[in-house]
Amino acid sequence: MLEHKELLKKNNFESQLNKLCCKLKNKKILIYGAGLFLKSVKENYDLSSLNIIGISDKKYKIEQYNELDFDYKIVPYSKIKEIEFDCVLIATLNTFNIYQNLKKDFKNKKIIILPLMEKTFFELLKEAFFL
């Protein structure tokens, strides 16, 4: 978890978070990704300025719908289309494939899809081509 904390610091996450809060003001946000990266973010930063209405992840089962994880309502991926939201924040380190899948699944909706932590162009290229 220390490596996540260091990565967040290295990428000036606090500044990124402030920009996200301004950009997404009054937007209903769904977090995608409920792993160690999000845990590190939650332990070290205040996300309360974001209007987070729920959290989704492939690990959640339908029986967990509306239970809490990370203090957010769980929305299993199969139920995402049943709720209203404006934005998905991808809370994982590897965002490329998740972004592609979300874009495909919501191609007919005007939903903003963003990484919780921005990466450099070179980092995205490495991720996309597994370098």
Image (tube, rainbow, N blue to C red):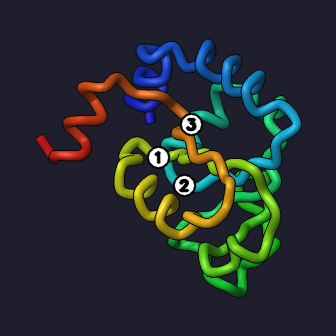
Nearer the observer, disc 2 or disc 3?
Answer: 3
Report x, y in % for residue 50.
79, 35
Taking the spot 60% from the left edge, 73% from the top edge, the residue there is 77
Report x, y in % for residue 114.
56, 41
Q: Residues within 10 Å of mark 2 (few under 14, many from 20)?
A: many
Of the numbered discs in the image, which one, if any, rests on residue 33? 2
Task: Tell me which amino acid carries mark 2.
Answer: Gly
Q: Is the residue under label 3 in contact with that under label 2 (CB below 8 Å)?
A: yes
The residue identified by callout 1 is: 92
Q: Is the residue under label 1 in contact with that under label 2 (CB below 8 Å)?
A: yes
Q: In the figure, residue 116 lies in which quadrant?
A: top right
Of the numbered discs in the image, which one, if any, rests on residue 116? 3
Q: In the figure, residue 15 lies in which quadrant?
A: top right
Taking the spot 51% from the left edge, 31% from the top edge, the residue there is 117
Q: Is residue 26 above or below residue 56?
A: above
Disc 2 versus disc 1: distance between alpha carbons?
6 Å
Taking the spot 41% from the left edge, 57% from the top edge, the residue there is 100
Position of 6 compared to 13: left or right? Answer: left
Q: In the figure, residue 38 lies in which quadrant?
A: top right
Report x, y in % for residue 41.
60, 34
Task: Tell me which amino acid carries mark 3.
Answer: Leu
